Amino acid sequence: METLTTSAKMKLAQDFLPINGTDYIELYVGNAKQSAHYYKTAFGFQSVAYAGPETGVRDTASYVLQQGKIRLVLTTPLKSSNPISEHIFKHGDGVKVLALWVDDATKAFEETTKRGAKVYMEPKTMTDAHGEVRMSGIYTYGETVHMFVERKNYNGIFLPGYEKWESEYNPADAGLLHVDHCVGNVGWNRMNPTVKWYEEVMGFANILSFDDKQINTEYSALMSKVMSNGNGYVKFPINEPAEGKKKSQIEEYLEFYEGEGVQHIAVATKDILKTVTELKARGVEFLSAPPNAYYEELNTRVGAIDEEVAAIQKLGILVDRDDEGYLLQIFTKPVEDRPTLFFEIIQRKGAQSFGAGNFKALFEAIEREQEKRGNL
């Protein structure tokens, strides 16, 4: 029986909801001004736009940063009575909105809500001197939201209500290009219902599945399924805990985030060696490298690659191969004090999978960090 490639599985998506890619990712944070400085300094994001009291917004301040096609929006509440304050008090800094770029935000809302999506925001048109943007929104897992953004009739800096943010401090970028995927952590026995939701409500296809026999260490395990839209521009792996001797990374996340949410954002680069070298020089902390045996066996396990193994090993980068090529990846430590949100840096050289061959090495590295925190 012929096994479909990951790319072929993407084409099985119903695709009644055409998506052009990730429009932006919005994080609710305790101090957006300081968070913006961090993402500029550490990751090389650039100042784009701002909305706050100076622009007529009375209850929040939002900073928009961009690198390549990656847009981050950092939003902080200005008073304790703001509902965003409650979100941050409960979850800490984290992703609230995974915004999707669509051709028709009204139709996207109608198609998903008639299939059972919970309403976050009815279709809304916002205008300014630069045109109009139409937006709508639905809830996905936990309190996370998908916003549908239609901006074909808009040529402003970001959205109506935002003004250009000019800064004298503009560190160079680090070679990050676009959002590759965003991973969600859900509770016990919640993966399959969430997968079904993405299939039925969003028209996505399940392109990869991993069970606790594939993703395990001596101490812990998890299960994961990867959801993708038809063109593969938007991919959402969904993780849930599995039984193990000790607490898994998913259980730790759920405990400290106090619910389901986005575990990590994977961002692509075309030169991972250069990008990771740059990020480390700026103070970004990565998980510890796997043992020497991982790299000694690399050629046998993965086959020929373009990069020098010694250079990859020096940086602690992981490598895996599928039927369509290979990929290189590395994971940061959590970017805040709660062990919740982190980033993945990934370079794809044909491969469309997610590094299944690296799971054991990755999760052992995470467990070493969990043990330091007393959470294993």
Image (cartoon, grey):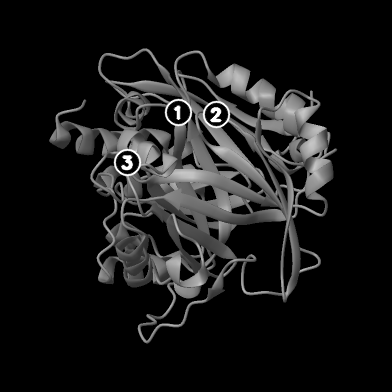
Secondary structure at badge 1 equals loop
Q: Amino acid at mark 2?
A: Tyr
* Residue 144 screen position, x and y as percent: 53, 36
| Alpha carbon distance from label 1 to label 2 | 6 Å
Q: Are marks 2 and 3 in contact (CB under 8 Å)?
A: no
Q: Measuring 30% from the left and 64% from the top, which residue is drawn there?
A: 34
Q: Residue at x 46, y 45 (%)?
A: 95
Of helix, strand and loop, which one carries label 3?
Answer: loop
Q: Identify the residue under disc 2.
A: 141
Q: Are marks 1 and 2 in contact (CB under 8 Å)?
A: yes
Q: Earlier in the sequence, mark 3 or mark 1?
A: 3
Instruction: Select label 3 or label 1 by which is in front.
Output: 3
Q: Which residue is mark 1?
A: 260
Q: Which mark is residue 92?
A: 3
Amino acid carrying label 3: it is Gly
Q: Nearer the viewer, mark 2 or mark 3?
A: 3
Give, as a three-letter code, the residue at label 1: Glu
Placement of 316 over or under 356, stated as above or below: below
Q: Nearer the viewer, residue 205 or 22?
A: 22
Q: Residues within 10 Å of mark 1 (few under 14, many from 20)?
A: many
